Image: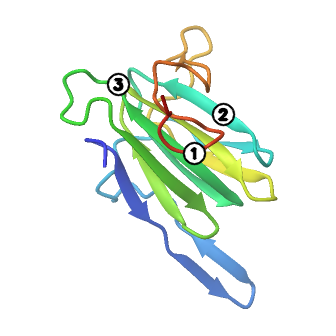
Amino acid sequence: MIDGVKIKKLRVIPDERGWLMEILRDDDDLFEKFGQVYVTTAYPGVVKAWHMHKKQTDNFTCIHGMMKVALFDAREDSPTYGEINELFVGDKNPILVSVPPYIYHGFKAVGTETAFFISVPTIPYDYNDPDEYRLPPDTDEIPYDWILAGKKHG
């Protein structure tokens, strides 16, 4: 696992009325602070990548459908510099992923349903000075292929 990235297994508590799943609590080991909560979706096969933050930690999960999450350690002073992690998150693997600053990340909705993604970053979005740094999904700066999955060949 990339240095500083943390995973929390989420527990689904079902009953005859439906189910409940706690995502992030202020007494979790990985909790830093609260910035905001937002939901975004991706239609099947859509890639939303790459982006990273210099200030905030992202905490996210997929609450409906499945998504493939890829992480890339862009920190030159990190013991895991250049490492890629690939995780599958959602209905079949309910986990929370905590991504520290300077880790590029993105996701692809996999399967036949729209994926619903909930994020709880540590800092609210600043419309005047966004902490958002982007690269296109097919950038040569990250050796990852969203189409074929995994490391780029050649």
Q: Mark 1: which secondary structure?
A: loop
- Please state the horizontal and vertical placement of residue 97, each as a whole percent of the image: 45, 51
Q: Which disc is residue 24 wearing?
A: none
Q: Nearer the viewer, mark 3 or mark 1?
A: 1
Q: Residue at x 65, y 48 (%)?
A: 117
Q: Amino acid at mark 3?
A: Ala
In the picture of the structure, the residue carrying the numbered disc 3 is 74
In the picture of the structure, the residue carrying the numbered disc 2 is 48
Q: Residue at x 43, y 58 (%)?
A: 25
Q: Residue furthest front?
A: 154
Which of marks 2 and 3 precedes in the sequence?
Answer: 2
Q: Residue furthest bottom?
A: 16
Label 3, label 2: how far apart the Cα atoms are: 18 Å
User: From the viewer's perspective, is residue 93 above or below residue 12?
Assistant: above
Q: Disc 3, disc 2: CB below 8 Å? A: no
User: From the viewer's perspective, is residue 27 above or below residue 92?
Assistant: above
- Please state the horizontal and vertical placement of residue 41, each as a whole percent of the image: 74, 44
Q: Amino acid at mark 2?
A: Lys
The part of the image, by quadrant, that contains residue 73 is top left
Q: Amino acid at mark 1?
A: Ala
Which of marks 1 and 3 precedes in the sequence?
Answer: 3
Residue in front for this viewpoint, 107 or 21: 107
- Please state the horizontal and vertical placement of residue 12, each as a whole percent of the image: 56, 76
Q: Which disc is residue 149 wearing?
A: 1
